[in-house]
Image (cartoon, grey):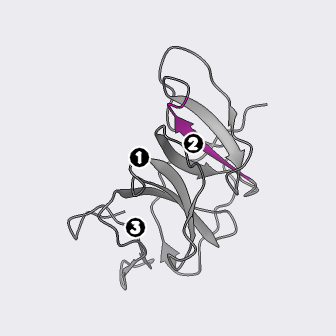
Amino acid sequence: MSHRDGNYEIYVMDADGANPVRLTNNPALDAWPDWSPDGTKITFKSDRDGNLECYTMNTEGKNLINLTKSPASDEGGAWSPDGTKIAFDSDRDGNFEIYVMDADGTNPVRLTNNPADDYFPVWFPEAKRVQPQGKLATMWAIVKQSR
């Protein structure tokens, strides 16, 4: 994520910092990217539809999908180690709680329920993170799986 062009946008670059490639180009906020475990997709949050939503795109910045499509603020997005789920936080029930959904955005389930705001879900234990060969990306969290 970078603010270099006046907007928060998502970039990838070579591991040595060379060859930055801008993946998003939108006046909206595009932030908190996280690679899928197989290295083929990136989840991120954006307010390009008027409120914060969780999105995915491929590693070239194409095939953008709004996963949450909610009038509430849906933030973050952290892949499960097996890539089948995405955890996120949302205020759709009145205050921020932690949710998990299938990687295609279906079947959201609230995991927390208390009057305090719950943010930034992480998966634990950390699985091996896969990134395209020679590329770096920022990540904001590692997701903790509750049992």
Q: Quadrant of the N terminus?
A: bottom left
Q: Is 8 displayed left or right of 91 in the figure?
A: left
User: Mostly what secondary structure, the magenta segment?
Assistant: strand
Identify the residue position indicated by label 2 in the image. Answer: 88
Distance in Å between CA atoms under marks 2 and 1: 15 Å
Identify the residue position indicated by label 1 in the image. Answer: 51
Choose top left, top right, bottom left or bottom right for residue 98.
top right
Amino acid type at image mark 3: Ile
Secondary element under disc 3, as helix, strand or loop, is: loop
Identify the residue position indicated by label 3 in the image. Answer: 10
Secondary element under disc 1, as helix, strand or loop, is: loop
Dot 1 alpha-carbon crowd within 10 angstroms: few under 14, some 14 to 19, many 20 or more: some
Extent of the magenta region:
85-92
Secondary element under disc 2, as helix, strand or loop, is: strand
The tally of labels here is: 3
Amino acid type at image mark 1: Asn
Residue 9 magenta-drawn?
no
In the displayed orientation, state which residue is furthest to the left: 6
Q: Position of residue 89 (x, y in %)?
A: 54, 37
Q: Position of residue 4 (x, y in %)?
A: 23, 68
